[in-house]
Image (tube, rainbow, N blue to C red):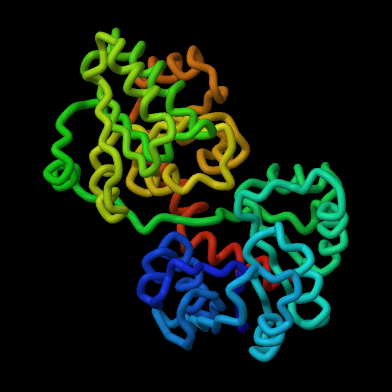
Amino acid sequence: MRYVFISYNYSADFSSPEAWFTRNLGYAGVMDNLSKKHEVINIKQINYEGIVTHNNIAYHFVNFSKKKLHFNFQLNRYVKSLNPDVVILHGLHQPLQLIQLGLMLGKHTRIIVQNHAEKPFPGGIKKSLQKLADKYADAYLFASHDMGMEWVTAGNLKSLGKIHEVMEVSSVFFPIPRPVAESQTNVKEAPVFLWVGRLNDNKDPLNVVRAFLKFAECSPEAKLYMIYHTEELLPEIHELLNSSPNKEAIELIGKVPHADLLYWYNSADFILSGSHYEGSGTAICEAMSCGCVPLVTDILSFRMITNNGECGVLYEPGNEAALLEVLMQTKQMNVPEKRRLSIEHYKQNLSFEAIAERIEGIAGRL
């Protein structure tokens, strides 16, 4: 079969194929695995034009318009010219483009639409267009089946029969010996807790910091390292730390190169999250691929990622007492068993191989 991946977004910040390959590592592995049995073409609009083959994938870098067009006939004609069997369209917030694509391709090409954290339009013309566009989609991929159900319940999509649970992204990381990892991070404590994410309200680092400072009162040996690449709530975090006698329990690392996360994940026992909403959960997936035990909020995507908490523990978002209770549970937890479950669940459900196999199965049944 010939798979064509397409996005209508124009990424002006990328001016070379190599830069885009690096940016797309979290998803490229899916296409890599599909290309072992099928022909795979990825159409992307960046500040570069040309066809480049990379890891058996034909990347078609086109540049029909630097603006987000509601009527992108040129791009749709280009897709049609490739005679795809299956088109995988990134994003559910472009219903008008989906309608045009469906009309141009006809019934012989199957269209699969992948959710990337979008929520259903609440009303108006945009919701009406989503309902109309549903006619032209043969399947939808959501990181959690329940996330897709929300779209059906809201009336934006018609049938649960088109909803499929497939992880959005995966991990390029893997387990390495802990001493090797610690030689790069200089982490020597145990247990080690890790935070990786933006310091914004949705990620809720303040709740995590408050709970961990209380946990440190009875577990002075525990240490939380926080890695982040945005600093929205950093002043508030500094204020919490400076007013606590346990401030040494938390170390603010800041931004690190993505490749270095391999060593951080393999230096940690637990990965923490305070998110109120996630389309999937890239950092949690990456951490689990290295054996970290997830202590994360009870949201739809994290239920799927943790197999409903079997691989770790879920707690109510924003609930400091609930998170503190979870942290206390780690003192009696069978950590090696939880680490084993995390890696096993990752391999079977979250890995590039697992995602590609599910997409292949869905496409084959359409």
State the image coordinates of residue 163 (x, y, percent, origin top left).
73, 55
Report whether 138 appears left or right of 218.
right
**Image height of 361 relative to 220, above or below:** below
Front residue (pair 348, 249): 249
Residue at the image position 54 percent from the left and 75 percent from the top: 44
Front residue (pair 252, 167): 252
State the image coordinates of residue 29 (x, y, percent, origin top left).
44, 67
**Image height of 143 relative to 355, above or below:** above
| Badge count | 0
Report whether 72 appears left or right of 212.
right
Quadrant of the image for the C terminus? Answer: bottom right
Residue at the image position 54 percent from the left and 61 percent from the top: 355
Residue at the image position 66 percent from the left and 86 percent from the top: 78
- The answer to whether residue 275 shows anywhere in this view is yes
State the image coordinates of residue 96 (x, y, percent, origin top left).
79, 66
Report whether 229 appears left or right of 4.
left
Front residue (pair 247, 108): 247
Quadrant of the image for the N terminus? Answer: bottom right
- The answer to whether residue 158 shows anywhere in this view is no
Residue at the image position 61 percent from the left and 49 percent from the top: 117
State the image coordinates of residue 250 (x, y, percent, origin top left).
27, 24
